[in-house]
Structures are given as C-alpha cells and as structure tokens.
Image (spheres, helix red, strand yellow):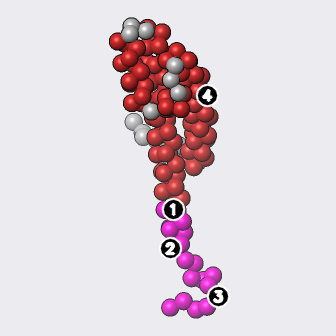
Amino acid sequence: MKKGKVETPVVDEAANEIVALRVLQVMYSNQLNAYERQIDEVSALGRVNRNTLYNPAVLHEIEAMAQRKKFEELLSAVWIAQSMLDDIIALQRTVCVLKRSMADESIEAAEKKGRDIDHEALPYEAM
C-alpha cells in the first residue's frame, strides 16, 4: 500500500479569529438586549431598582425573598435572569481570551519581524 501525502489548504487563522470575534460581539450585544428586557420584568415584579439587578448577589437575595413568599412568577424571572447573566459573563470571558490571544500573536509577529533584519538592505555596512 502506498501512502500519499495529504495536502491541507492554508487557513488564514487571523481572518478566522477576526470573524469569530465579530460573531461573538454580535451575540454579546443580542444577549445584553435580551437581558435588559428580563431585568425590566424582574424589576417590575419585584419592585426593585433595576440598576442593582446586574449584581448576582442582588439577584440571589430576590430569589430567596421570592421563595419565602412563594412568588413563583418572580422566582421564575429571577432564575432566567441569573442564567442569562451567567451566559453573558461566560461570553465576556471568551471575547477577552480571544482578544488576548490575538494581541499575543500580533506582538510575537512584531517581535519576530523586528529580529529579522535584512543586512543587505541597510544603508550602511553591517558588522
């Protein structure tokens, strides 16, 4: 049996990372918009200041109060908001990791480019 070489196409990783970053940012924006609507619902049901509802600890306190008072509609809305907030935080972390890896790659490429000096192209004689 003869083994042949498998040629894989060259993939532009930087372009793929940029596309992935843009997709993640659109997803993040959509999730934030949905979370805003959910926060409005929790705020109306729980009669709390909506500016405090971005804190997971506040959501947990509202959840405990809703369980004590057996307010099922508020409890359901809080659980949905908590789940959405967890998803948003995870997406934020993913975007940060992707941006950091892209920055590291560009720094490494710039350092490599800086080290590769073409001595023949220099206007003076290299030692």
Decide whether residue 121 is among the magenta residues. yes
Say which element carries label 1: helix
The residue to which callout 2 is attached is 115
Amino acid type shown at disc 4:
Asn
Real-space Cα separation, disc 4 to disc 2, in angstroms? 46 Å
Amino acid type shown at disc 3:
Pro
The foreground one among 89 and 81 is 81
- Tell me how many marks there are: 4
State the residue at coordinates (49%, 35%).
Answer: 91
The residue to which callout 4 is attached is 33
The residue to which callout 1 is attached is 107
State the residue at coordinates (50%, 73%).
Answer: 115
Mark 1 nearby-residue class (10 Å; few <14, some 14–19, many ≥20): few
Magenta stretch, residue numbers:
108-127
Mark 4 nearby-residue class (10 Å; few <14, some 14–19, many ≥20): few
Q: Is 106 rendered above or below residue 77?
A: below
